[in-house]
């Protein structure tokens, strides 16, 4: 996760803000603006602190939130995609499959099957 020194710095502030706005359009420019940094400097410092680009970090957070929503809600796949900031359900599905090797629908079904079998 984020170490304490980073959490208090501008990159940590931007990361925290982004986590509360995953459904919004999150560009480098938007994130940099939150902490009054230039987009170029923000991108460079973000990569130094995290080892990944802001876009990759945001995608990972969105997919993580999508998994949580698939596990804990009855929102449709389209609603999950929208809530997590994906441009379309197709984009969401493609990214989900690429990252987790299964579709969002299959993931939800698999998760509910596992949860149901642990009740006995």
Image (spheres, rainbow, N blue to C red):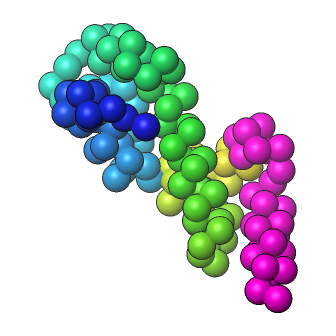
Determine whether, in the image, residue 30 is placed left or right of residue 108: left
Quadrant including the N terminus: top left
Give the answer, above or below, for where 22 lies relative to 105. above
Q: Is residue 103 magenta?
A: yes
- The residue drawn where x is 77% and y is 86% is 119
* 49 shown above or below 107: above
Q: Is residue 69 above or below residue 93?
A: below
Q: Is residue 3 left or right of residue 25?
A: left
Q: Quadrant of the C terminus?
A: bottom right
Q: Residue at x 67, y 48 (%)?
A: 92
Q: Which residue appears at 72% of the width and 46% of the height?
A: 96
Count up the numbered dots. Answer: 0
The residue nearer to you, when weighing 18 against 82, is 18
Q: Is residue 3 left or right of residue 85?
A: left
**Residue drawn at (43%, 49%), measured in percent from left and top?**
22
Image-quadrant location for residue 89: bottom right
**Picture coordinates of residue 98, whole percent (x, y):** 77, 37
Q: Position of residue 51 (x, y in %)?
A: 48, 17
Percent across and percent down for residue 61 are: 51, 43
Q: Is residue 30 visible?
A: no
Position in image of residue 58 (x %, y %): 48, 36
Query: Can residue 71 be seen from the camera position used here?
Result: yes
Q: Residue furthest left?
A: 36
Question: Which is the main secondary structure of the residues drawn in magenta?
Answer: helix
Q: Which residues are magenta?
A: 95-120
Is-magenta flag for residue 96?
A: yes
């Amino acid at each position: 996760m984020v170490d304490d020194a980073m959490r208090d710095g501008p990159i940590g502030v931007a990361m925290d803000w982004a986590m509360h706005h995953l459904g919004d359009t999150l560009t480098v420019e938007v994130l940099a603006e939150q902490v009054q940094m230039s987009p170029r400097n923000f991108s460079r410092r973000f990569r130094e602190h995290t080892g990944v680009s802001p876009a990759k970090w945001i995608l990972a957070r969105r997919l993580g939130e999508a998994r949580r929503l698939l596990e804990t809600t009855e929102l449709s796949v389209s609603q999950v995609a929208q809530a997590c900031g994906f441009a379309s359900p197709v984009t969401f599905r493609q990214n989900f499959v690429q990252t987790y090797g299964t579709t969002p629908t299959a993931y939800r079904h698999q998760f509910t099957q596992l949860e149901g079998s642990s009740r006995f």
